[in-house]
Image: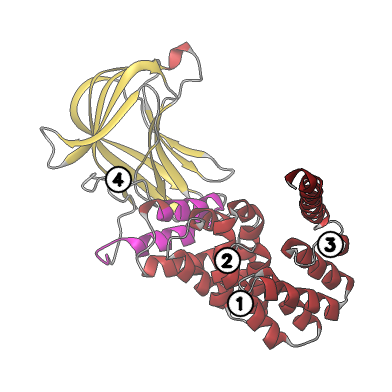
């Protein structure tokens, strides 16, 4: 009996394996064809989600709104939490002119598929069209978090949109939350080629008022204005940032080095120069901190110590106290006043060299009526580049001031 049943058992196994093989083959074909030929994939496997999504997208692209909606609903019947199907329904509703329904459906799509860039981009565009800048920027934020590489394209566009004050204020509120794309956005706003100084001013002013503008942010803002030769605006904004509400500022701010220079605005700047050490510390013979420079005998074109000035046309006198120890160079160091413009250097001090105790030196100079919107005061080595540029020794500087 057993022997007679063996052929039937074998035949059954063959049928079962053949059926299983047919199902596997069908699944493989469905997966392979799902994107390129969704209809063929669905013929093999009618409940293939990927094929249904591709079919819905294809029908939508062809303008077959009913077909796109039918495929999207079939997909939702299989996967109720599927997000992109709602996106297809939203775009179909938009094509039919039902914008409110489209907005509701696309909002569901963005919730169900939070990493769907297409949904966030659609919503950002619609909210911008409605003038709801804050809502639009929520989706811009999502896009830039999901795909940071999109910043290079999006941020210049956002900078242009910020020429609308309402958008600028909404952008400032978003940036105050410290999103990861904040620094790049601030750079785009201040970009000399694509940025808008007025829009940048609105955004940065708002950040300044709520206390979310760092010292580095302030420095970049003011330096950007100076680079654009907007010296008057840079000076006014910097003066407004100073604590204490001073009624009148000296022509040379922080000339006694009483406050540690922060390199922001119209304060002292210290640029790193190999072979020069710069510090601000108290010494004997001075009431407070002084600038201390130590030259290590290397070739240097300058000390790295400089100060921006905003002086109106007229005649001025620069005064300073200095002392030196074994300071030696080919032609001595020199204070220079230079215009940020075609006029360039307008004053040079006598050489500073050798060893001497505290003494007061002075330098008179004229600011011309034109070609000099702002100025730089620098301690430099006037010797051209070469072996003769070597500088060694120490120099102390204190009580620098400019008088009209």
Gap between marks 4 and 2, in whole Å? 47 Å
Q: Earlier in the sequence, mark 1 or mark 3?
A: 3
Q: Which mark is residue 114?
A: 2
Decide if residue 130 is in sight here. Answer: no
Location of mark 4 (residue):
261
Tags 1 and 3 touching, CB below 8 Å: no
Q: How crowded is mark 2: few (under 14 residues within 10 Å), some or many (20 or more)?
A: some
Residue 160 in the image: x percent, y percent? Answer: 64, 65
Secondary structure beneath dot 3 equals helix
Q: Residue 108 carries which label?
A: 1
Q: How crowded is mark 1: few (under 14 residues within 10 Å), some or many (20 or more)?
A: many
- In the picture, measured across the screen, residue 244 lies left or right of residue 285, that is right
Gap between marks 1 and 4, in whole Å? 53 Å
- In the picture, measured across the screen, residue 338 lies left or right of residue 88, that is left
383 lies above or below 34: above
Give the magenta range. Answer: 217-246
Q: Which residue is drawn at 58% across and 80% down?
A: 132
Gap between marks 3 and 4, in whole Å? 67 Å
Would residue 108 be counted in the magenta stretch?
Answer: no
Q: Which of marks 4 and 2 is nearer the N terminus?
A: 2
Residue 229 in the image: x percent, y percent? Answer: 55, 53
Q: In which quarter of the image is residue 98?
A: bottom right
Tags 1 and 4 touching, CB below 8 Å: no
- Nearer to us of marks 1 and 3 is 3
Q: Which of marks 2 and 1 is nearer the N terminus?
A: 1
Judge by depth and name the residue closer to the eye, 174 or 369: 174
Secondary structure beneath dot 4 equals loop
Q: Which mark is residue 5?
A: none
Q: Residue 38 carries which label?
A: 3
Gap between marks 2 and 3, in whole Å? 25 Å
Residue 40 in the image: x percent, y percent? Answer: 88, 61
């Amino acid at each position: 009996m057993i022997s007679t049943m063996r052929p039937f058992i074998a035949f059954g196994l063959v049928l079962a394996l053949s059926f299983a093989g047919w199902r596997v083959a069908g699944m493989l074909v469905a997966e392979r064809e799902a994107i390129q030929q969704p209809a063929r994939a669905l013929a093999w496997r009618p409940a293939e989600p990927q094929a249904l999504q591709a079919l819905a997208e294809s029908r939508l692209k062809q303008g077959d709104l009913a077909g796109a909606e039918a495929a999207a609903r079939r997909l939702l019947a299989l996967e109720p939490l599927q997000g992109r199907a709602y996106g297809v329904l939203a775009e179909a509703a938009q094509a039919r002119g039902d914008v409110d329904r489209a907005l509701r459906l696309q909002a569901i799509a963005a919730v169900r598929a939070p990493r769907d860039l297409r949904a966030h981009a659609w919503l950002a565009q619609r909210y911008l069209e409605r003038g709801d800048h804050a809502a639009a920027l929520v989706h811009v934020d999502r896009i830039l978090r999901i795909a940071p590489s999109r910043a290079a394209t999006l941020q210049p566009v956002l900078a242009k949109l910020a020429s609308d004050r309402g958008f600028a204020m909404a952008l400032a509120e978003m940036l105050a939350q410290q999103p990861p794309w904040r620094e790049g956005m601030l750079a785009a706003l201040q970009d000399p080629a694509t940025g808008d100084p007025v829009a940048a001013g609105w955004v940065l002013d708002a950040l300044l008022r709520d206390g979310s503008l760092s010292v580095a942010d302030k420095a970049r803002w003011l330096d950007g204005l100076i680079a654009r030769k907007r010296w008057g605006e840079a000076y006014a904004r910097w003066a407004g940032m100073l604590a204490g509400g001073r009624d009148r500022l000296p022509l040379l701010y922080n000339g006694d080095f009483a406050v540690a220079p922060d390199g922001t605005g119209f304060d002292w700047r210290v640029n790193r120069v190999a072979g020069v050490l710069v510090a601000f510390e108290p010494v004997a013979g001075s009431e407070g901190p002084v600038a201390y420079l130590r030259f290590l005998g290397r070739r240097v074109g300058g000390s790295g110590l400089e100060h921006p000035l905003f002086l109106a046309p007229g005649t001025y006198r620069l005064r300073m106290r200095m002392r030196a120890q074994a300071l030696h160079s080919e032609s001595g160091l020199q204070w220079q006043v230079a215009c940020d413009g075609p006029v360039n250097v307008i004053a040079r001090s006598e050489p500073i060299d050798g060893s001497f105790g505290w003494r007061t030196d002075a330098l008179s100079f004229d600011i011309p009526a034109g070609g000099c919107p702002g100025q730089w005061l620098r301690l430099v080595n006037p010797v051209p580049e070469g072996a003769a540029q070597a500088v060694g020794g120490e120099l102390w500087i204190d009580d620098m001031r400019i008088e009209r």
